[in-house]
Amino acid sequence: MTPTPVVQFGTSRFLQAHADLFLAEGSPARTITVVQTSGSSARAGRLAAFTAPEGYPVRIRGQQGGQIIDEERRVSAVTRTLSSAIDWQELSRVISEEAQFILSNTSDAGFDAQPDDTTPHPMQSQSYPAKLYHLLAARHMSGGAPLSIFPMELIPENGSVLRARVLEIAAANGASADLTGWLGRCLWANSLVDRIVSEPIEPVGAVAEPYALWAIEAQPGLVPPTDHPSIKMVPSLETIERLKLHILNLGHTAMAAFWMQEDGPVTASDALVRDLLAGPMGTRVTQLMQDEVLPGFAVHGMGAAAQAYLTTTLERFANPFLDHRIADIAQNHAQKLDRRIGTFLTWVRAVAPNYSAPVLDGLMGASAPAASTPKSSAQKEM
């Protein structure tokens, strides 16, 4: 079998329509070993479908640049699938002998510590960071070079968090200074990913919007697994995080707030974002963005970037193929107000204390404060 330079932990439809598609279309195109970390026997047929000779379908549906897009692409980059539960020996060999890049999207909870994480040998019951530690330790023992590791979980500073967890597990396992130093020389990338993947295609495949982003924070020696228009190396993720949190996510929450204030048919629980955007509420949201949100970005020298991002965001909201219910966005509304609007006002007023935002202030005042204020990041706001 042809060696696979990319080893991917996770089988989600998001990865299928995001990183896997980019790796198939990029330069150079990369082959992938996909690893199922859950150990679920119910998904054995799904694993086999990843490697079908004709590839699996990704349907791109939406609008971009004013044009309607409805097309199918095929992904044939996955050439091997393994389960961490039953294929550990082969997985360890692939990591030790073939891997150059490791990707993961194991859900936010995939990083959570598990009782068996400090066991000195690999176990299926361990968290992803613990499994990764044992695989990297085996590679180090075999004389392999340090790897580039790209977590894609929706966790702020995901690369730094994963590195810290792996080193913590290494310390608990009594890892040598040589191994610990080698782990530190691996490149742990912080990244932010964004694409709405709305539906699965069985047994493998997905329906996704045209917009896609994989932003990777630059560091010395780090290169992306492939070159692709949707993969961006950036000096810092902060700008992208702010744009996503305070335009896309804030826009959704403002629309939900306006929707909850309205009387009549517009309050129907099946109301869709695209329909609301096309009516008076869309005008209201757009005006709010122009009057109170974009000037706040301008205070931070980000006015042009915010205007361009708003244009793209409104196009995404209007996707004629995406049935995005406003009632779903309205869930946990008080917490979203705080994370998306409250933090925006704090960010802007740290520079311009007298910044005027009467509508945003009104939305904040209309809701009781959340019981607690969790740490937030645009990465948590998909």
Image (cartoon, rainbow, N blue to C red):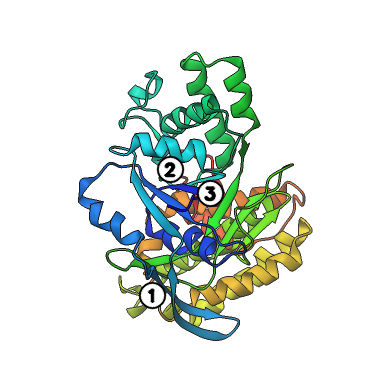
The number of numbered discs placed on residues in the rendered structure image is: 3
Badge 1 density bin: few <14, some 14–19, many ≥20, Cα 10 Å: some
Say which mark, if any, is on residue 5. Answer: 3
Q: Amino acid at mark 3?
A: Pro
Percent x, y of residue 230: 60, 64
Q: Which residue is mark 1?
A: 272
**Residue 372 position in % (x across, y down):** 46, 38
Depicted 81 relative to depicted 159: above or below: below
Q: Residue at x 74, y 42 (%)?
A: 220
Which of the two labelled residues, at mark 3 and mark 1, occupies the earlier sequence position? Answer: 3
- Which of the marked residues, 2 or 3, is nearer the chain's N terminus? 3
Residue 187 appears anywhere in the view: yes
Q: Position of residue 194 (x, y in %)?
A: 53, 60
- Mark 2 or 3, closer to the camera: 3
Q: Which residue is mark 2?
A: 108
Q: What label sits on residue 300 in the rendered view?
A: none
Q: Quote the CA–CA distance across marks 3 and 1.
A: 42 Å
Say what amino acid the circle numbered 2 marks: Asp
Cα–Cα gap, marks 1 and 2: 28 Å
